Amino acid sequence: MEFEKITSNKYSFMDQKNNKNAIIMLRESGTKQVIFVEGIEDLIIYKILYKNYLYQIAFIESKGCDKVSEYLDKSLKLDDSKRYYGIIDRDFINDTERKEKLEKNNRLYIHNFYTLENYLLDYKILSEILKTKDPYLENNLKQKEKKLEEEIKFIIETILKDYLIYGICNWIIKDYNMEEKNKNPKFEKIGYLTIGIVKDKIESSIYHKLKIEENELNRKIEEKNKSLKFQSIDDYHKILSGKKIIHQLRKDVEKIEYLPTINDNDLDFKIKIAEKYNEKNIKIKELGDFIDKIVKEIN
Amino acid sequence: MKVLRIFLYNTGVHKKRVIEFTDNNGNFKNFICLAGVNGTGKTTLFDLIENLGRFLNRKVQLNDFSINIERENVLSLVDFVQIDFLIDNKIISVVIGDEKYIQNDNTKEQMFIIENNVKEIIRKFEDDLKSQTEEKNISMIEKTRFEFYSREFAKRAKRLKKTKNNKSFFPVLQEISNNIDKNLIQNQTNLPFIYYFSDNDKKIIDTRYKILPKYELRYDIVHKYSPSQDDLKGLLVYFDYAFNDKYLQLVEWINKNIFEDKEILQIDRPNFNVLIKTNTGDTHNIDYLSSGEKSILVILVNIFLFANEQSIILIDEIEKSLHPQFQEKLLNLIKKLQKERGFQVIISAHSRKIWEDLQEDEIIDLTK
């Protein structure tokens, strides 16, 4: 008769040196459902957004998208495998590829938007947070409520459109990296510039990195632009990092003269938005369904 | 002596498992922490080590086992269990249940102590106890009834299933049996010894002595700490009178390692009390220590005095009543003593602080 072997090292597949806290959290999770998430900021936001589920779900920081997949794969070999899930950023895949991946692995959710932060860019919620920031200005702001909403919406859309070139160029870099002959060394994505958008500068950065002709790059940008078929603002959210958008938004909002200065850093600002989402019970469409499904699995 | 592994079949929550206390190369581990949510069978494992360990004494008797109507003895819940103990580099496997489930270890000499009838006797005795008396304590059962079951117990099936090399095991078992009931303090030998601190018993009870307490710890293969029998105050007072050198050594170690803002000052000889001096200069009786301080003192004093290379120390819910700072200190001091003496430690913990201070290869997680 075979006895099931129980040994130490249950969670030794996780990084014991750099991510011991995640192991402890995993052990503390007991029999709760577990969702591996990418980084510490994501972890903080998820824990606020889904505060009411924390007695049933434990979010565990994995330190990167690859680690989420790796930890999920390895935990699916454990005897309590049924409780493990993961959530990762979209990271330059088209809708068809995403659909296929979701169908192939229903335990690993890929965001519909580029990052978790993209979901936090609801202009109505943002207006609400900003307008109540200073009680002395509240009356003044009430009259301008509609105007503020419009203004925030405009700022977000402008940033998304301005930054589009980064998204497209970074996708081109990713495609380049995916080609077998270019795998070593891989190029990092280009960082978003926060002081104005200088198309030439971005392009020269790409020429420099990929060493391709100007014409070829323009052709690639054109192709990508066409294939992505930008029909709504959601399509921009699919290729642009919400982290960067929020950073730029904070800066741009400060230029609205009737608003007080925002002293928060990016994370504090995101926490405020997430708290508002939780307070108003706002469901993030597909992600919310995934979380609900995980909770239902308990029964 | 070390525990190598425990095979379980239909025993409490354990359906068909082997809990391994060895590494990938089959070498025993000196430090193991059992983790897992409530109800994953941690205490059952401690109780099994305690109860099966007793069969290493060939003169085992019915009253070596704790039987009362409040809680069933773990042996009556067992379908099959086999514990492999490593003693002098040989394996002695104690088995309760059907022999067809027995597992062999081919890496070392191995012998089996098979106790098939014990479960039935204990269960019958427990049933009899429930139906015949309102009393909850075994000592209140009529003497004849107890004697009847004791005789049944003594008649239990032939215990030692001989293996090819069985003779080489007899000296170990003989030595254990020969030393049972001898004074442990006066005969500091390197005998196999399991010392068990259960989750609720790490206390010091307030005993007021009128005469000098006679503290005697007699050798037994398993000792379960009992606040009444192993009264720490009695031990310290007795050591001060009878073994003053050891007393001074112990107190110096306690004052240096355990307490920070207080110390054991002296024994109040006329009143048989232990006096504690605080850093504000006040003195108080040892009974006024907090429950956490008592718990840490009980565990560490007993390990300091009695643990040797052949010992296994079992501590269930080690963090109970302890602030994280004290948990850290207790774990640290146990590990230090363990490294010096080489005994095996098996603890259970639900505490983040304890888990943080351990390596992943020291934790067995029983959560399913």
Image: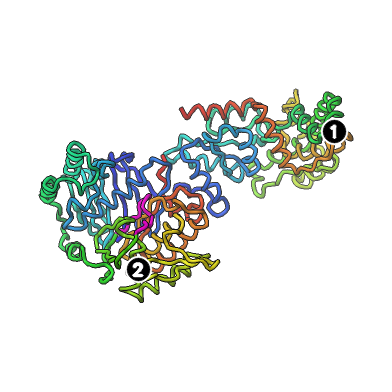
The residue located at (44%, 65%) in the rendering is: B336
In this figure, which residue is indicated by the disc labeled 2? B237
Residue labelled with disc 1: A137
Q: Amino acid at mark 2?
A: Val
Quadrant location of residue B73? top left
Q: Which residues are magenta?
A: B194-207
Q: Is residue A5 above or below residue B260?
A: above
- Judged from the image, the secondary structure of the residue bearing numbered disc 2 is helix
Specify the subunit that label 1 lies on: A
Which of A202 and A195 lies nearest the eye of the viewer? A195
B159 and A195: which is toward the camera: B159
In the rendered image of this protein, does residue B179 appear above or below residue A27?
below
Answer yes or no: are tags 1 and 2 on the same subunit. no
Quarter the N terminus of chain A occupies:
top left
Residue B125's x, y, as percent?
17, 42
The nearer-to-camera label among 1 and 2 is: 2
Q: Residues within 10 Å of mark 2 (few under 14, many from 20)?
A: many
Residue B209 position in % (x across, y down): 32, 63
**Is residue A23 toward the left or the right of residue B26 in the image?**
right
- Image quadrant of residue B174? bottom left
Q: Chain of mark 2?
A: B
- Does the magenta segment cover residue B206? yes
What is the image's colouring? rainbow
Queried whether the magenta region covers residue A272, the answer comes back as no
Mark 1 is on which residue type? Leu
Q: Main secondary structure of the magenta part?
A: loop
Q: Is residue B39 visible?
A: yes
Left or right of A27, for residue B236: left
Instruction: Between residue A208 and residue B80, name the one nearer to us.
Output: B80
